Image: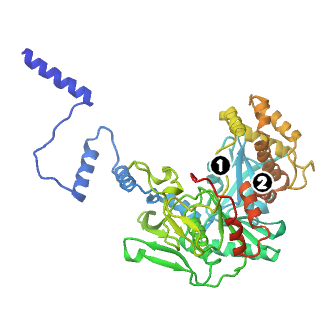
Amino acid sequence: MRSRAFVVLMVLSTALVTGGWLVSRGLDGASSVSGPRLFDEVMTHISRYYVDSVSTSDLYGKAIDGMLDELHDPHSVFLRADRLARLNENTTGNYGGVGIQIDVRDGWVIVVSPLPGSPAERAGVETGDRIVEVAGKSARNWTMEETRSALRGPPGSSIQFVTERGGVRRPVTLVRQEIHRSAVGPSMLFPDGVGYVDLNVFSDSTEKELSRSIDSLSREGMKSLVLDLRANPGGLLTQGVGVSDLFLDRDQEIVTMRGRLREANRKFVDSYAQRWPQLPIVVLVDQYSASASEIVAGALQDHDRAIVVGRTSYGKGSAQTLYPISGGSALKLTTARWFTPVGRSISKPAGEDDDEDVDNAPETPKSEREQFKTDGGRTVYGGGGITPDVTVGDTVPLATELALQNALGRKVPQFRDAIADYAMSLRGTRAVTSPDFPVTDAMRDEVWKRMRARGIDIDRAVYDSAAPLVSRLIAPDVARYVLGRASEQRRLVQDDIVVRKAVELVRGATTPKELLTRVSEQPARPPSE
């Protein structure tokens, strides 16, 4: 009996240590199963016997997500109806709404700008207006996503909201219409004929919109171009090819696709003679430039048609195909890898750990990357994104800026609220009449007062030491709320160190060849870069 009790005690202890009892049900050593039958059997057992109730639809959804996750490819995903709708909006640039760009300040939704020709603009909604009610509900402490969801809807439907300006509230009723979000952001002409165009996304109208912007700048006297692809996540492959086509010669290769299936293999070449063959071009990229952005940057770099300035791009050298699934969803699946004209794959390699995806993989040093030669014999690199010809834009903040950030801690939103509050206080005062205004000590003092009023208690010396950063943050907000969105964009671009470097390089260059010569004379970066 004592021996038997000991055995029972050991079994109980083992069960507790391993997490509970294992109940055997028909383990008869039968032959193994695989494929659909195995999946169905596991699904049935979970559905019937798992300790918590899980619906069959949830189990199938988790199985799909798990299957795709095991591909270790962040670009292959199952798109449920809501995500598919967002993707379609990004690729078309169209949505149903009232045409308002918004921000959140001091717990209220603030109008950044009504879009030209939109229902909001026609109704007199202005930059700086506060949205206090939407559809009879207070908008206090609403997020931007909540506000967008409330304001958007089918074209032709109505929406009521209340704005506040100067303490006066005004009810507004608008009929939603189809809004087109332009792929081209700010475009402007700097002194000495340097044009600047910000390209936000590669939607289905990008090539046409960019062409119109360049034509417009050319009529104003543009002699060289800075094409900004920073933070451009890409989009449609065909638009990446189309934009490249604008700047290359007929029959020059743009990109080559290579996949497992025959139909996934294709080479894209330039179809038309370029319209601006003598236009010197600088392309700006950063770590958020991906996909079609990298196709454009890679093609122009390989053919020595442009120089690339900024930070190494994201490294998405793959193409996805969208397969519709019944029920309004779709499967976005990687079906090919793409290569630049000289044969580079710029895909960021995954980390050594199998669980580390490419999004989190560290940047690969140049010394470990394969080298290629451009048409003119310059060295370019494969693997890990498009490497700029000139690296600008240090991602490491200055010690004084880091000290301010650490001092603010979780009160950064209140800090930005203080800046916006000061900027809006200048409306109608005529204290600022040009986007080139200097940020003065008095302006920073006013922001400091508003910081203190919001409970931000930091050392004044830390604040003053970071004056250059504070000034860079004050300037665009003042330009936005006093002079309008266009002035804000111009001020942001003028104060951008990467843009300034690009303008410095391209100013006065009369041909692409002359620009390349200038770049070759730039000091080399340290070998570790």
Pick whichever, 144 or 350, lies toward us. 350
Taking the view exactly as shown, the residue that stands out farthest to the left is: 1
Q: How far apart are marks 2 and 1 (CA)?
A: 27 Å
Residue 479 percent coordinates (x, y): 82, 52
- Looking at the image, which is closer to me, 337 or 50? 337
Disc 1: CA contacts within 10 A as few (<14), some (14-19) or many (>=20)? some
Residue 258 image position (x, y, % from top left): 43, 72
Q: Residue 285 carries which label?
A: none
Mark number for residue 144? 1
State left or right for residue 380 relative to residue 7.
right
Instruction: Say whether residue 174 is left or right of residue 267.
Output: right
Q: For residue 495, which numbered disc appears in the image?
A: 2
- Image coordinates of residue 522 in percent, x first then y, are 69, 61
Q: Is residue 23 visible to the viewer in this orientation of the structure?
A: yes
Residue at left offset 49%, top offset 71%: 343
Question: Residue drawn at (83%, 42%), measured in percent from left and top?
Answer: 422
- Please identify the quarter of the rendering in which residue 89 is found: bottom right
Amino acid type at circle 2 is Asp
Say which residue appears at 91% left-offset and 54% top-offset. Answer: 433
The three-letter code of the residue at mark 1 reads Met
Where on the picture, by quarter, is residue 391?
Answer: bottom right
Residue 82 visible, this angle: no
Q: Position of residue 392 (x, y in %)?
A: 67, 55
- Give left or right: position of 473 versus 46: right
| 392 shown above or below 20 | below
> Of tags 2 and 1, which is closer to the observer?
2
Front residue of this view, candidates 293 and 51: 293
Decide: few, some or many residues near mark 2? Use Cα within 10 Å; few <14, some 14-19, many ≥20: some
Q: What element carries label 1?
A: helix
Q: How many labels does the image show?
A: 2
